Amino acid sequence: MSSAGLLKSWQLWIWKSRQSRRMKRARRGAATLDYVLLLAIMLPAAAFVLWASPRIMNLVYEMTCVLVSWPFM
């Protein structure tokens, strides 16, 4: 490899390492934010599912009964 090619690859390596350091610095504290956003979305969704699922199951049961009994009415 020529000295110019070696210099160019060395410069590329330095640029990539600086770039990765910048990206790591930019992500500092993002895990905490991700955790809070996950809780802010998933807890209300789970609460809604636990509240709505018995009603939905009851409505599906009633709809199935109506569809099965319809020809005999």
Image (tube, rainbow, N blue to C red):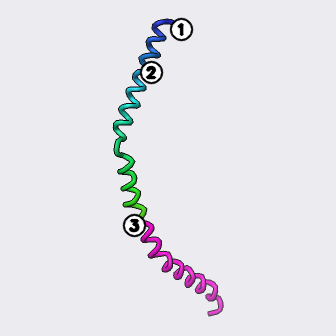
Secondary-structure class at tag 1: loop
The residue drawn where x is 53% and y is 82% is 58
Percent from the top left, x then y, of residue 57? 54, 78
- Asked whether the beta carbons under mark 3 and mark 2 sit within 8 Å of each other, the answer is no
Q: Are marks 2 and 1 in contact (CB under 8 Å)?
A: no
* Extent of the magenta region: 44-73
Label located before the other in sequence (1 or 3): 1
Q: Is residue 12 above or below residue 33?
A: above
Residue found 60% across the figure and 86% down from its top: 65
* Residue 22 vertical position relative to residue 13 in the rendered view, above or below: below
The residue nearer to you, when weighing 27 against 71, is 27
Residue that numbered label 2 is attached to: 13
Residue at disc 2, secondary structure: helix
According to the picture, the residue beneath numbered tag 1 turns out to be 1
- Which of the numbered marks, if any, corresponds to residue 57? none
Q: Residues within 10 Å of mark 1 (few under 14, many from 20)?
A: few
Residue 3 located within the stretch drawn in magenta: no
Percent coordinates x, y for residue 62 in the rendering: 55, 84
Amino acid on which the number 2 mark rests in the picture: Trp
- Residue 32, percent across and down? 36, 50
For the residue labelled by badge 3, is the local secondary structure a helix, a strand or a loop? helix
Could you tell which of marks 3 and 2 lies nearer the N-terminus? 2
**Three-letter amino acid code at disc 1?**
Met
Q: Are marks 1 and 3 in contact (CB under 8 Å)?
A: no
- Furthest toward the top, the residue is 2
What residue lies at 45% left-to-right and 8% top-to-bottom?
4
Look at mark 3 in the image and give the residue it sits on: 44
Which kind of residue does numbered mark 3 sit on? Pro
